Image (cartoon, helix red, strand yellow):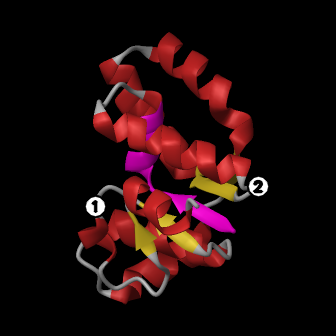
């Protein structure tokens, strides 16, 4: 299964965000053990580095992301996702770009903390906890 992680899930993995971090760690650990492919966009990495640098500093971001980098397939946002987002009419353009990047990379599902941002999704959308509840035996 190809599982797309929204930027907020990546941030949960990189920073101490309490229960959100625990849920994201549990979800990604299960997906990895299940040999699922975890997808993140290049834009998510850039945004997470910007946010992480403000919260914990550049060195900590580099160290933390480097430790988990190999578990992800980093996909390009690309012009096709941006063009699709421009005409989609969704409320939040940045989430629409993420969605179309996921679709273009043939994701089977999308994980996020903000499901309402993906109300128009044709992909199944889960929080980290919901993903575990759906797929963990």
Magenta stretch: includes residue 91? no
**Mark closer to the observer (2, 1):** 2
Viewer-proximal residue, 7 or 91? 7
Residue 43, x across and y down, in percent: 52, 50
At label 1, counting other C-alpha atoms closer than 10 Å, the crowd grade (few under 14, some 14-19, many 20 or more) is some
Above or below for 6 versus 90: above
Quarter of the rendering occupied by the N terminus: bottom right
Instruction: Give the SS element for disc 1.
Output: loop
The magenta span reads 1-13
Above or below for 56 versus 115: above
Residue 113's image quarter? bottom left
Rendered residue at 68%/35% (across/down): 69
Residue 20, x across and y down, in percent: 33, 40
Q: How far apart are marks 2 and 1 (CA)?
A: 25 Å
Is residue 130 visible in the rendered structure shown here? yes
In the figure, is residue 67 to the left or right of 8? right
In the figure, is residue 3 to the left or right of 93? right
**CB contact under 8 Å: marks 2 and 1:** no
Residue identifier under label 2: 35
Above or below for 28 versus 103: above
Residue identifier under label 1: 114
Residue 50, x across and y down, in percent: 40, 31
């Amino acid at each position: 299964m190809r599982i797309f992680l929204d930027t907020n899930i990546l941030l949960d993995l990189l920073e101490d965000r309490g229960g959100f971090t625990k849920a994201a760690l549990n979800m990604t650990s299960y997906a990895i053990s299940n040999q699922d492919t975890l997808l993140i966009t290049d834009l998510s990495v850039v945004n997470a580095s910007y946010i992480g640098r403000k919260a914990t500093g550049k060195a900590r971001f580099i160290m933390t992301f480097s430790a988990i980098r190999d578990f992800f397939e980093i996909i390009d946002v690309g012009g096709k996702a941006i063009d699709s987002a421009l005409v989609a009419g969704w409320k939040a353009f940045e989430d629409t770009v993420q969605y179309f990047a996921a679709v273009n990379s043939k994701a089977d599902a999308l994980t996020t903390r903000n499901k309402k941002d993906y109300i128009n999704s044709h992909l199944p959308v889960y929080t980290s906890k919901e993903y575990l509840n759906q797929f963990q035996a």
